[in-house]
Image (cartoon, coloured by chain):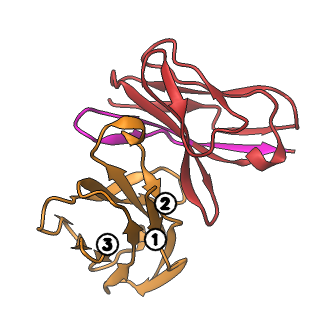
Chain colours: A red, B orange
Amino acid sequence: EAQVTQNPRYLITVTGKKLTVTCSQNMNHEYMSWYRQDPGLGLRQIYYSMNVEVTDKGDVPEGYKVSRKEKRNFPLILESPSPNQTSLYFCATKHSTDTQYFGPGTRLTVL
Amino acid sequence: AQTVTQSQPEMSVQEAETVTLSCTYDTSESDYYLFWYKQPPSRQMILVIRQEAYKQQNATENRFSVNFQKAAKSFSLKISDSQLGDAAMYFCAYRTRAGGTSYGKLTFGQGTILTVHP
């Protein structure tokens, strides 16, 4: 079954405590990306990756890092989370046929 | 840069009735995709319907259809015979067909919350 998984699904943390949200896909897709969803703003792209070792900034990259050491995984790293990073995060992958697959979302709260 | 605007924060409809959700976008490109995504309370993003800009024919998926007006940059979603399970947040989204740094990126509207009354 085609799947994009994210972990954790829910996370409450405190300001400054480094965290990683993992994203894994089993579809061998080259393109992966991260979005954040905020009320009234829709979803906005944070970072994307065209392939292994190829990553670039999206529209709202400040405060985030990513890595793409292998095709299936694309973790999102918050080195020093702040309350304005409280949001709902989605990982997404794209097939060459243009179908996009979204993960189930990660609800992050930074106190 | 492309922008997508959904001017209706909330809409409601009676079960079995028809409702139309509005979406406008701004782009200088001629070749792109437009999408409607549904986000139920589970928060999962579900693709409802997709339209290629080069196709004049409006896309249809069962009870869901679009009215694509390329010159007006308008892309509305019509839901016929509304069902309780249609209640969700609906997002309109744009994606270029060109390569470059925008390849694969979806630009979303703000979303419209749809309530279905029994």
Q: Is residue B67 magenta?
A: no
Q: Which residue is mark 1?
A: B87
Q: Which residue is mark 2?
A: B40
Residue nearer the viewer, B96 or A43: B96
Name the mark nearer the viewer: 3 or 2. 3
Query: Are the two marked residues, 1 and 2, in contact with CB atoms closer than 8 angstroms?
Result: yes
Pointers 1 and 3 within a single chain: yes
Q: Is residue B3 visible?
A: yes
Query: Are the two marked residues, 1 and 3, in contact with CB atoms closer than 8 angstroms?
Result: no
- Give residue B33's position: percent from left, percent from top: 28, 54
**In the drawing, does residue A18 fall left or right of residue B21?**
right
Identify residue type, mark 2. Pro
Chain for disc number 1: B
Chain for disc number 2: B
**In the drawing, does residue A26 fall left or right of residue A39?**
left
Q: Which residue is mark 3?
A: B73
Q: Is residue B51 above or below residue A18?
A: below
**In the drawing, does residue A82 fall left or right of residue B103?**
right
Identify residue type, mark 3. Lys
- Give residue A41's position: percent from left, percent from top: 60, 62
Quadrant where the C terminus of chain B lies? bottom left
The stretch of residues the image draws in magenta is A90-110
As helix, strand or loop, the secondary structure at mark 1 comes to loop
Q: Main secondary structure of the magenta part?
A: strand
Which image quarter: residue B19? Answer: bottom left
Between disc 1 and disc 3, whose residue precedes?
3
- Give residue A108's position: percent from left, percent from top: 72, 43
Looking at the image, which residue is at 87% across and 45% down? A111
Q: Is residue A95 above or below residue A70?
A: below
